[in-house]
Amino acid sequence: MSDDPPRPVSGQQSDPRPAAGAPAWWAALGRPDLPLDSDKPAAPLHVAPPAHTPAPSRSFRAIRWRTLAFNLAVLAVAVLIICIGIGVVSVSAFLTAALLFGVPLSVAAITATVVARRSR
């Protein structure tokens, strides 16, 4: 056997720093913004309840519905123009064209709406 001291298990390296407590200069650090040490605990802080935001006004809701209706009307007109342009003659072809062109158009409309709202 070797005379070397036992090594700690892997992952548990010993700390080379002394653990004798705070250094001598620690007490010289004055912090007037901190309370002095005391034996009694500090009083608990009372947090104010969160302020309630008022419900959106009726005119805001009307504007939102009007915007949604306008976006849907533009989307329907765009899909109809595309269907006429590609020569749709049956209901199943119309539904296929509406899915193929309506989904990307609706994603574009939603993206434009979100960007417009966030840029205000």
Image (cartoon, rainbow, N blue to C red):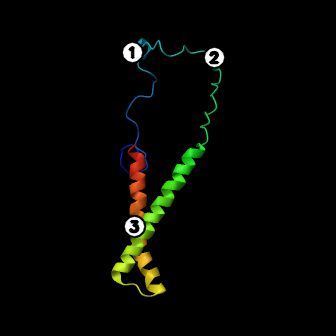
Regarding residue 39, the answer to whether it shows in the image is: yes
Res 93 → quadrant: bottom left
What's under tag 2, amino acid-wise?
Asp
Q: Which residue is mark 3?
A: 105
**Label 2's element?**
loop
What's under tag 3, amino acid-wise?
Leu
| Distance in Å between CA atoms under marks 1 and 2 | 24 Å
Q: Earlier in the sequence, mark 1 or mark 2?
A: 1
Tag in front: 2 or 3: 3
Check the image and name the residue furthest to the left.
Answer: 85
Q: Which residue is mark 1?
A: 25
**Label 1's element?**
helix
Q: Which residue is mark 2?
A: 39
Q: Are marks 2 and 3 in contact (CB under 8 Å)?
A: no
* Residue shown at the point (57%, 49%) measured from the top left: 61
Q: Position of residue 40 (x, y in %)?
A: 65, 17
* Residue shown at the point (39%, 67%) measured from the top left: 105
Marker count (numbered): 3
Q: Residues within 10 Å of mark 1 (few under 14, many from 20)?
A: few
**Residue 106 drawn above or below residue 9:** below
Check the image and name the residue furthest to the bottom.
Answer: 90
Q: Earlier in the sequence, mark 2 or mark 3?
A: 2
Q: Position of residue 43 (x, y in %)?
A: 65, 20
